[in-house]
Image (spheres, rainbow, N blue to C red):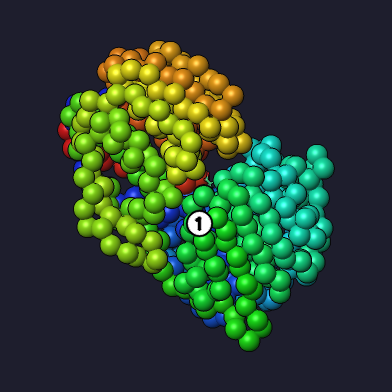
Amino acid sequence: MSQITLTSPKRLRGIVAVPGDKSISHRAIVLNALAAGEAQITHFLTGADCLSTIACMQALGVPIERQDTTVRVAGVGRRGLREAADVLDCGNSGTTLRLLAGLLAGQPLFSVLSGDASLRSRPQRRIVAPLRELGAQLDGRMDGDRAPLAIRGTPLHGGVYDLPVASAQVKSALLLAALGGDAPLTLTGRIDSRDHTERMLIAMGIDLQITATSITLHPPTTTDELQPLSLRVPGDPSSAAFWWVAAAMHPDAEITTTGVCLNPGRTGALDVLRAMGAQIRIMNEEMAGNEPVGDVTVCSSALRGTPIDGALIPRLIDELPVLALAAAGAQGHTIIRDAQELRAKETDRIATVAAGLQALGVQVEPTADGLTIAGTGNPTLLRGATLFSHGDHRLAMTWAVAALVARGETTIVDADAVAVSYPGFWEEIDRLCRND
Ligand code: S3P
């Protein structure tokens, strides 16, 4: 179990090219695997989660070669996957497991999907129930609510499914299930989660009709396959958010994160930081690979509490741990609501974030669907502590940001969890602190 001890540097300055976006990296592999032809993906995220997706797709017979952050995928077509010889190991990655469950439900193969202890404890009924409604044959522990999931792929019928939760993993699983078949599928309800799958499918030539209240996918005919899509993966805003919060909280800081994905479905953290009074500049905005990107600079700011709830939540769900930390150093109260999804992440992030903030000396109350945080009024009033990642990458990085601003020493236990989404994170901290 790795531990890292840090103290607050006098100054925190630099330019950070954040690694490729995790959601887009997964989708670039899975969708290009189904294309008719070869694609090259650059600035791919080499975090453990995305490597799990590569390994699973290779096990399903897709030739994929990776050299550092450049990946070549030789697509096998929508009907070209091969049955895997063993259990598909999704590691810690919910996105791998859920996207592949959807994809494989409609393929004429038998598949078993599993992962590490954290992934096996996360709810899967959210994909199993709608896939069963489409005619899929799949099962798992606890009547299909927990992995391992066993899937006997079969042609699915289309129809209309009303999404009860704003989840991009569920939405994408269903679109992938429909993609393998012949019947159109319409999704209604909570379609307001990140839309990377939709953007990529459209760029690959799929007939996808999107309105304010529905998404309809018409599967291509056999003569009209998915076109391969070469792309450079934009920087991950969920990784950049650690630097945004560090810069806003530290008394002498300026950090620029370059080439960050600014898809509106992912920029809720910037909206909240602005509402908290953070000084933020966005420059060099452009479109890259069907996604808006830009450089984001944040400098030392006097932060105040703000409500975080409602439609904002799906736009910043992965950033809530580090935003809770920002709230802990701010003036006044912050109430986070409508975020019960946090309980179903890599850890129960309502419980684990509350415990860490309490250790830092913050008054915080976990609620059923969020947190009520009494800001200390000044980040330097946070008291250095021993903080646990519980194997959750976003907690490890949130506590690293706490260490950059708190008084005294902070030790992060199980620090190597960062490798799931941000290889090189600790080296980057070192570099930013050395600009002293
Ligand atoms: C993801 C969607 C989000 C997010 C996760 C990645 C994706 O989960 O929390 O880290 O790539 O589709 P939801 O499925 O709850 O939206």
User: Is residue 406 something one can see in this rendering?
Assistant: no
Q: Is residue 265 left or right of residue 292?
A: right
How packed mark 1 is, by other alpha carbons closer than 10 Å (few <14, some 14-19, many 20 or more), is: few
Residue 360 to residue 72: above or below: above
Residue 326 to residue 282: above or below: above
Residue at the image point whose x is 18% and y is 29% from the top:
252
The amino acid type of the residue labelled 1 equals Ala
Q: Position of residue 263 (x, y in %)?
A: 39, 54
- Where on the picture, by quarter, is residue 143? top right
Q: Is residue 78 left or right of residue 71?
A: right
Which residue is at the front of the view, 4 or 316? 316
Residue at the image point whose x is 72% and y is 63% from the top:
159
Residue at the image point whose x is 26% and y is 47% from the top:
296
Q: Position of residue 204 (x, y in %)?
A: 50, 74
- Which residue in the protein does label 1 denote? 212
Residue at the image point whose x is 47% and y is 46% from the top:
421
Quadrant including the C terminus: top left
Which residue is at the front of the view, 12 or 122? 122
